[in-house]
């Protein structure tokens, strides 16, 4: 089975505009950022942001019976874009990218990798 560290490294290489990849599994967060990049959040803010993303993700699942399970959620901020998706169970993937990143192209690649990971485990 591939480790969360390895998943983060793989996903960082999907596109050069990816700034950060984080995986939240319960209380544990594993993350990597693009080399040479300053972090917009400190460690405690990073954990808090991931925890909030998990709560928002869980709230999206309320209407899963009507709409189907969510595939991903994307938020565009002034400085970055951020995608959230479920890896498995309550394991959440967070990917932030530069504000001018081709998010639709990146999201398609992330979904393909996620699908491959789910068949490999």
Image: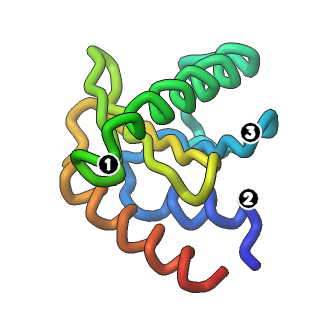
Residue 15 lies, in percent from the top left, at 37, 58
Badge 3 is on which residue? 29
Q: Nearer the viewer, mark 2 or mark 1?
A: 1
Residue at 76 percent across and 67 percent down: it is 3
Cα separation, mark 3 vs mark 1, equals: 29 Å
> Residue 2 at what x, y percent from top left?
72, 74
Which x, y percent locates residue 47?
70, 24
Name the foreground residue: 7 vs 121: 121
Q: In the rendering, which numbered label is found on residue 65?
A: 1
User: Relative to 61, is 45 on the left or the right?
Assistant: right
Residue 5: image tag: 2
Q: Tell me if mark 2 has few (under 14), some (14-19) or many (20+) residues whose alpha carbon lies within 10 angstroms of its own.
A: some
Asked if residue 115 is positioned above or below residue 100 in the image, the reply reads below
Give the SS element for disc 3.
Answer: strand
Mark 3 neighbour class, 10 Å CA radius: few under 14, some 14 to 19, many 20 or more: some
Asked whether, in this view, residue 30 is left or right of residue 79, the answer is: right
């Amino acid at each position: 089975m591939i480790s969360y560290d390895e998943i983060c490294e793989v996903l960082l290489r999907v596109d050069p505009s990816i700034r950060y990849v984080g995986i939240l599994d319960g209380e544990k967060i594993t993350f990597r950022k693009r080399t040479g990049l300053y972090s917009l959040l400190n460690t405690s803010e990073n954990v808090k942001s991931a925890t909030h993303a998990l709560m928002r993700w869980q709230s999206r699942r309320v209407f899963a019976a009507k709409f189907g399970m969510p595939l991903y959620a994307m938020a565009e901020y002034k400085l970055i874009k951020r995608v959230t998706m479920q890896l498995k169970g309550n394991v959440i993937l967070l990917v932030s990218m530069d504000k001018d990143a081709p998010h639709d192209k990146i999201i398609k690649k992330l979904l393909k990798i996620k699908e491959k990971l789910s068949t490999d485990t």
